[in-house]
Image (tube, helix red, strand yellow):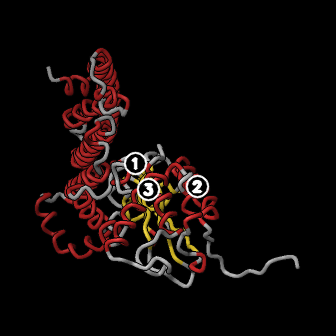
Amino acid sequence: MNPELWLENILTSMGLGQEMTNYAMLGIGSIILLLVCVLSNLVTRKFIVQGIQKFIENSKNDWDDIFLKNKVFNSLSTLVPLIFIQYLSVPILSNFSSLIPFVYIVVKISLVWVITSVLVKALKAMEEVSTKIPSLQDKPIVSYIQLASVMIYLVASILIFATILDKDPLALLGALGALTAVLMLVFKDTILGLVASIQISSNDMVRVGDWVSMPKYGTDGDVLEITLNTVKVQNWDKTISTIPTYAFISDSFKNWRGMTDSKGRRIKRSLNINMTTIKFCTDEEINQFKKVEMLKDYIEATQSEIATHNDTNSHDKSSMLNGRNLTNIGLFREYAHQYLAANKNLRTDLTLMVRQLEPTGNGLPIEVYCFSNNIAWADYEAIQADIFDHLLSSISSFDLEIFQNPTGKFGS
């Protein structure tokens, strides 16, 4: 016997009119449907979702635990009640057939929303999984995840509007083609960010963890995150700068990764020598400099070379202007070079030199150019300071002076 007809006969026999019978049947059917939905949801969670969770907890993989933590599978239990509502609403609403299309629309929208939620949670879990994979940690995976999320929401929105308007989604998508210009304007930053992310990734321009400097944005620090629209940089003062991703394509910036990879940080600083203190060295001064261990071998070798040159060319050495002679600035340069070469904190396999630059109104620059073997900021600064502490203290031993702008002296 048909259950609907059986229930209708019982209600009629109780003296209810046809209209009241219809409403009573609707109420009873709704209660039954509600109970079926609750029970199906509980059964799905108890046997299917919890079964999946136990399987994941017992597995040796770490990535599936991340999917579990992001509750990717929890939303699946909502699908079963929605399916029951779709199929049971027809007999329940047999006397209110005008409501069936509305219920179908609500069910379809709910299905789209649940599936969208599952996909977005899955993408979020995939983003977290990518942070655990070493080969992907320096890639802008977040940008691609965000783009995929935007596309999912866009498709879901089209399906929802197509359901409400009772239109073919493809036809609706075609109609949206006329709004391309508007969409391009609305999603301008997203499109620029996507293009920039692809170029940054393919050209390996920036990675998470890189030290970058962008004076235009007042940024100097480590890259924390690369997303579709922005790059987060933690400056050395612990402030956070948020820079548009496409700025790394359109503007210039400095990436210090090469220094980090080489394990050597450059020291490039000059001492400005007062040019009035530069002179030839006398024999007495040279004998004193021979007592300096770092200069003894150099002076002896150079003296022999100079003597051979002067004798060969018959230079009159009664004047120091004739032939070749040692100078205090030359000996200082050699001393500084030997001091750097013996410094255990410097890289001898990278460029190491002490050179003269073009004289200026501030004296003769003697530039130290070398690389420390410690790239940590505080250690690097300490190494650099120790080097120049020593060289500045050594200047007077060569009868040289550091150039300083006149500031006046106290005392009579």
The location of residue 360, given as percent across then percent down, is 51, 83
Query: Is residue 180 toward the left or the right of residue 171 in the image?
Result: right
Task: Tell me whether the residue at label 2 lies in contact with that at label 1, contact meaning CB atoms closer than 8 angstroms.
Answer: no
**Residue in view at x 19 percent, y 37 percent:** 90
Return the residue at label 2.
385
The location of residue 51, given as percent across then percent down, is 28, 17
Between the residue at mark 2 and the residue at mark 1, the CA separation in whole angstroms equals 16 Å
The location of residue 45, given as percent across then percent down, is 32, 22
Return the residue at label 3.
300
Residue nearer the viewer, 52 or 391: 391
Q: Secondary structure at mark 1?
A: loop
Amino acid type, callout 1: Arg
Amino acid type, callout 3: Glu
Residue nearer the viewer, 153 or 326: 326
Query: Is residue 351 toward the left or the right of residue 411 in the image?
Result: left
Screen quadrant of the N terminus: top left
Q: Nearer the viewer, mark 3 or mark 2?
A: 3
